[in-house]
Image: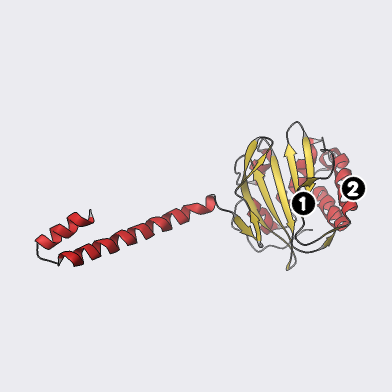
């Protein structure tokens, strides 16, 4: 294309042939750069998300399915960063109701950003579940809540950099993994995972900005809850 254009310009006497080729080459380079910029703009949907210095992959495998990152954000306690959290599901949801109703496996992946007493974290999670469920619904998740408390009690302390995932697989239950290793048998009650997810997505979330981030919205500076 450039050679044809250069020849046409040269024949008309407007520019010397070599100058025309140079101009065409510059045009081709700029076109390549523009294409690269367009591709880069589309890349975030498939690239790792860096949240609070923690990388969240765009997809993770679970129970034979590929889950996509719905959103990820930082949990703040006043102005202190406590942990990052990412929500993975079979497909994306923009509202809490959609996320809670989405069928299939789900994962909440948390990475600690500071040291914290594991028992304290367990108590905060329990209170968050209570704050976002009716007494009847919370009572159904009590067996799982007790098992989760036992898991945190056995750890004593979670250090900055430690991670844990809460995996829900329909028909199997909820498994808690600390630093990638399963800590106990799955919690069978399906109500437990829903109650746990409401800690961040319920009407009284632990952190309003984190709720927005997990739903893929632009996070707003809100500091509330546990």
Q: In the displayed image of the protein, which residue is found farthest to the left?
A: 12
Q: Is residue 112 visible?
A: yes
Q: Secondary structure at mark 1?
A: loop
Q: Is residue 203 visible?
A: no
Instruction: Using the image as rendered, state which of residue 129 and residue 92 is in the foreground.
Output: 92
Tell me residue 123's x, y (percent).
86, 54
Please name the residue shown 81% across and 63% down the image. Answer: 115
Tally the numbered discs: 2
- Badge 1, how many Cα within 10 Å: few under 14, some, many 20+? some
Q: Are marks 2 and 1 in contact (CB under 8 Å)?
A: no
- Badge 2, how many Cα within 10 Å: few under 14, some, many 20+? some
Tell me residue 171's x, y (percent).
75, 31
Q: Secondary structure at mark 2?
A: helix
Instruction: Using the image as rendered, state which of residue 156 and residue 102 is in the foreground.
Output: 156
Residue beneath label 1, please? 179
Left or right: 202 with respect to 48? right
Instruction: Using the image as rendered, state which of residue 150 and residue 63 is in the foreground.
Output: 63
Tell me the distance, in whole angstroms, between the alpha carbons under discs 2 and 1. Answer: 17 Å
Tell me residue 93's x, y (percent).
61, 44
Residue beneath label 2, please? 150
Tell me residue 60's x, y (percent).
64, 44
Q: In the displayed image of the protein, which residue is found farthest to the top?
A: 171
In this view, the mark in front (2 or 1): 1
Res. 114 mark: none
Please name the residue shown 73% across and 36% down the image. Answer: 169
Way the structure is coloured: secondary structure
């Amino acid at each position: 294309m450039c050679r044809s254009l250069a020849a046409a310009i040269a024949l008309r006497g407007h520019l010397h042939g070599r100058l025309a080729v140079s101009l065409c080459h510059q045009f081709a380079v700029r076109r390549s750069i523009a294409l690269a910029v367009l591709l880069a703009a589309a890349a975030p949907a498939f690239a790792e998300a860096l949240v609070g210095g923690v990388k969240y992959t765009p997809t993770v495998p679970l129970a034979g399915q590929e889950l996509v990152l719905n959103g990820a954000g930082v949990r703040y306690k006043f102005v202190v960063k406590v942990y990052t959290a990412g929500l993975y599901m079979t497909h994306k949801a923009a509202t809490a109701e959609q996320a809670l109703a989405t069928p299939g496996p789900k994962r909440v992946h948390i990475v600690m950003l500071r040291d914290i007493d594991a028992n304290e974290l367990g108590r905060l999670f329990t209170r968050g579940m209570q704050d976002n469920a009716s007494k009847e619904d919370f009572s159904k998740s009590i067996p799982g809540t007790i098992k989760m408390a036992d898991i945190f009690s056995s750890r004593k302390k979670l250090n900055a950099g430690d991670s844990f995932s809460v995996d829900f697989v329909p028909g199997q239950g909820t498994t808690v993994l600390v630093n990638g290793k399963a800590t106990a048998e799955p919690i069978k009650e399906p109500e437990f995972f829903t109650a746990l997810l409401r800690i961040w997505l319920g009407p009284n979330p632990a952190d309003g900005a984190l709720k927005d981030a997990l739903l893929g919205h632009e996070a707003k500076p809100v500091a509330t809850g546990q």
